[in-house]
Every structure is written in structure tokens, then in C-alpha cells.
Image (cartoon, helix red, strand yellow):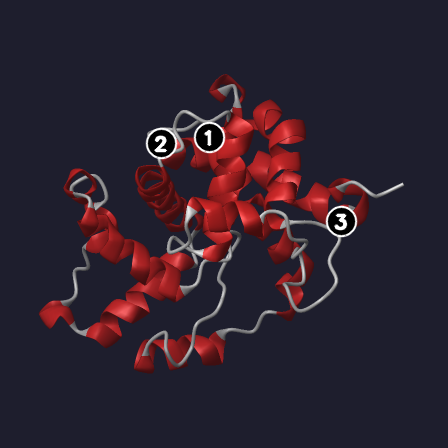
Amino acid sequence: MAQTPPQWFDSQWSDAITQCQRNKRIIFEHLSGNPIPIAESVSVVFPEMLRYVLWKDLFETAALELLYVRYGSTKADFSIGWFQMKPSFAEKLEREIYTYPELVMHYSDLTTYSIPNNDSVDIRSERIKRLKQLSWQLKYLNAFIAIALKRYQVENLEPVERVKILAAAYNRGLVQSVEELKSFNKLKTFPYGPQRTNPFGYAQVAEYFYRTSANKIFTNPKTL
């Protein structure tokens, strides 16, 4: 009998669940204005939380941070924090916001840097500092979902199907079509990536968390 994600990930699964519970207050604070329920939003990135728990002790990013700050994401691009956001991901979102005039004001805190002369090195340094904070990762997640909803027009899908499409887009990038994302969701690429044998699909893990845990954790803000 095939293992479920909690059985396969074991303590890593329970650790990621614990982090969701511990951070409910800040999650509600930053995702409450999102057009989809918080349980869906967190489900989109839950696979990355698992990946972070799996390999957090192996991360050493200090040298990569310096390389990125000095030369940009073409020279150093690496995953940061619970949602495993890369600097290039944040850069792309900051640019994408301007594609939708109705989002520009709402997400002005992401696109605005108080850096004299718009120095690119200082901006990259500030971006790294942002990505190290859960509050900022939640802001970027909020913007990602807002943009993805406009791009993929999935508001009217069943919640589970919406979670699967958005999770695939988070993993693959906003350049993929809906058809490409659905095809990707048939592949077992998690947690090691497409070059290795894996037990699950990326969106399969997001879906399992959504069906079994997300609503229990995030439905009632009165439990904060």
C-alpha cells in the first residue's frame, strides 16, 4: 500500500504543521485580504515548508547572499525561508505587479525601496533582508496569488482544483499555461526534483494538506 505524505515525511510533516499553527497570527495578518481563503493560500506553499524542514540544516547561504547582492540573480539564485522563495522570484513579482494597474497601489510596499539613487546593490541587499522574514514572504505570497488568479482565471474552480493549479504555478513559475501546469501535476517530482525518483507530485502534497489539515488550522481566526 502506498504511503500517504504524512507517513512518508514523518516528523518533517508534523514539524511543518506545527509551524503553521505557531505562525497563525502573522499568517492571518498578512493573508486575510487575499481573494481566496487562507487555507488555500498556505496549501499552495506547504510543499516548500516541507522541503525547508527536510534540508534546513544543510542551508548555508551567506556566500550566495553576497554574490547575489553584488552581481544579481544571474550569478546567484537560491531558496530562502519557509516558503523557499528565490531572489529572482521576488524580482519577477515586483515587475509583474506593474502589469496590473489595480494591483500597483495595493502592493506598493513590495515595489518601493527607500534606497538613495535607486542603487541596485542596496536594493538587492534590502530584498534579501525582506526574504528572510516570514512577514515579507507572506506579502510576496499574497501578491503571487493575486497575480496568478488574474493570469489563470481560476476563481470559479473548486477549491481543490484551484490549489493544485496555483501550487504548480508556484513551483513552475507564472510563465506556464494552465495546460502545462495540469500536465506537470501528473508527474512525481517531489521532494527531490525531476531528475530523481520521487514518491509524490508537488501539487499532490499541496492537495493532501488542504484536504486534511489546512481548513482545520486556518478556518477560525478566533482561535489565535
Q: Secondary structure at mark 1?
A: helix
Q: Is residue 217 above or below residue 142?
A: above
Q: Secondary structure at mark 3?
A: helix
For the question of whether residue 23 can be seen, the reply is no
CA separation, marks 2 and 3? 29 Å
Q: Is residue 180 above or below residue 116?
A: above
- Residue lying at 37% horizontally and 78% vertically, measured from the top left: 74
- Residue lying at 32% horizontally and 82% vertically, measured from the top left: 71
Q: Nearer the viewer, residue 90 or 132?
A: 90
For the question of whether residue 155 can be seen, the reply is yes
- The answer to whether mark 2 and mark 1 are in CB contact below 8 A is yes
* Side of 193 relative to 28 (left or right): right
- Residue marked by disc 1: 38
Quadrant position of the N terminus in the picture:
top right
* Side of 94 relative to 217 (left or right): left
- The answer to whether mark 2 and mark 3 are in CB contact below 8 A is no
- Residue lying at 71% horizontally and 49% vertically, measured from the top left: 200
Give how far across and how far down residue 129 sits, in percent: 36, 62
- Residue marked by disc 3: 9
Give how far across and how far down residue 17 sits, in percent: 65, 39
Q: Quadrant of residue 207?
A: top right
Q: In the image, what residue type sits under mark 3?
A: Phe
